[in-house]
Image (cartoon, rainbow, N blue to C red):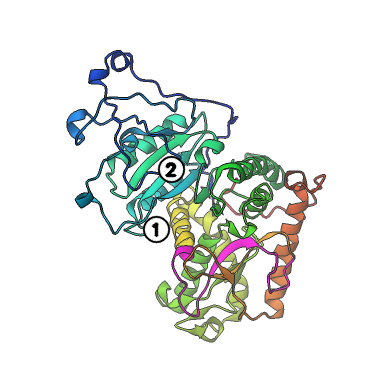
Amino acid sequence: MSLAMAMAEVSPYSYTRFQNLPSNLSSNPSTAHFFQKRRSSFQHPHRPPSICCSVAPSQVESPVAPVLPTDAASNRECYGVFCTTYDLKADDKTRSWKSLIRVAVSGAAGMISNHLLFKLASGEVFGSDQPIVLNLLGSERSYQALEGVAMELEDSLYPLLREVSIGINPYDIFQDAEWALLIGAKPRGPGMERAGLLDINGQIFAEQGKALNAVASRDVKVIVVGNPCNTNALICLKNAPNIPAKNFHALTRLDENRAKCQLALKAGVFYDKVSNVTIWGNHSTTQVPDFLNAKINGIPVKEVITDRKWLEQEFTERVQKRGGVLIKKWGRSSAASTAVSIVDAIRSLVTPTANGDWFSSGVYTNGNPYGIAEDIVFSMPCRSNGDGDYELVKEVVFDDFLRERIEKTEAELIAEKRCVAHLTGEGNAYCDLPEDTMLPGEQ
């Protein structure tokens, strides 16, 4: 999966932006479009009571005396109509809606987010009865684009989208977040080695881990998309000791989706017939698409696709190189399919896994039943009850081919861990990466 078109620029977090009233409004409060109303049941307890709204008085029911915002010291700014508060009459309340859920997204001005945010706001991800707050993290350079994203969300009139805040400081944007989708990272530039990218992006994720640790919900679920995502997730969780390590995920779902597609094509079936597909290990060319445990129509893949050579060679290569082929065809890296895979990853955690099936996610290896080295983030088969948590699947089988491939990707992740030891609090870094295994499109 490539993120080159989804990367947010990195800037110092000390930058502050304040949103000031136009002089004609601040000098004439009777015409200002700023209203204060009693919060509905959807109000988050940490949000300030005063509001800044772009909706004219004639467009809002029962406006009260205009009030200026009192939270000028905050870098997290509500945007436009999302600053409005509503005084819902008892008979107007939508009793079936759940409590607000707050989702923070980094790299929010990038191409992946341009697809993802509208899926989140529509109810496609968390459900049609789940109102949502979006906190969007950008950079000083991308701030204007971030405002454009907020404008599009504003114009889309999603009834479930109750608040949108934008900012460039993770300590503001991650405040009280229950989900953190960390997409923003630097792409690899010309001539940059994988070790250099690990260091540059590792610093970003170390800072974001510290911010999550300081201000996010204690049970925040974190999905790391920015590459190299496995080791970035490890850095992030190491810098967030007050959040369970089990809550951190590295996105390997797009790799799983690609594997399902290739198996379906080879077997001549639609991809909804393919199940129990696992991506083992790192999000790199050492990843291991597992055909041994996969099924088609409930039958083991190796009994449906009897060409063992194809399974061992061409299948794996097609999954690994799919992103590069897409770039050659389209001239850009995958964005929409990456956004879909993020949606799939979240939904796998908030809806019960189908009986007998599982899904792939890069998770912390401590206590794993497969004999994989502990203290790394490794993609493995998971199952969920739909409560945001997961368990590792035990009923998987291994053969010599699968074990050998898993050991190779395991060794790479251990080497990456040594390379970022200075960012995980484990001493001096030592980089001895055996080869460049960056997936196509990540340059």
Mark nearest the camera among 2 and 1 is: 2
Magenta segment includes 350: yes
Left or right: 399 with respect to 81?
Answer: right
Residue drawn at x 46%, y 50% is 335
Q: Nearer the viewer, residue 434 or 283?
A: 283
* Magenta stretch contains residue 274: no
Cα distance, mark 2 to mark 1? 21 Å
State the SS at label 2: loop
Q: Amino acid at mark 2?
A: Pro
Q: Quadrant of residue 287?
A: bottom right
The stretch in magenta equals 348-373
Residue 53 shows in this picture: yes
As drawn, 68 above or below 348: above
- Quadrant, the N terminus: bottom right
Helix, strand or loop at mark 1: loop
Asked if 54 appears above or below 371 in the picture, the reply is above
Q: Which residue is under mark 2?
A: 45
Question: Would you place residue 69 above or below residue 329 in this image?
Answer: above
Tell me residue 301's x, y (percent).
53, 81
Total numbered labels: 2
Identity of the residue drawn at 80% across and 45% down = 429
Residue 277 image position (x, y, % from top left): 54, 73
Q: What residue is shown with label 1? A: 126
User: At 50% across and 47% down in the image, what residue appears?
Assistant: 177
Mark closest to the chain's N terminus, 2 or 1: 2
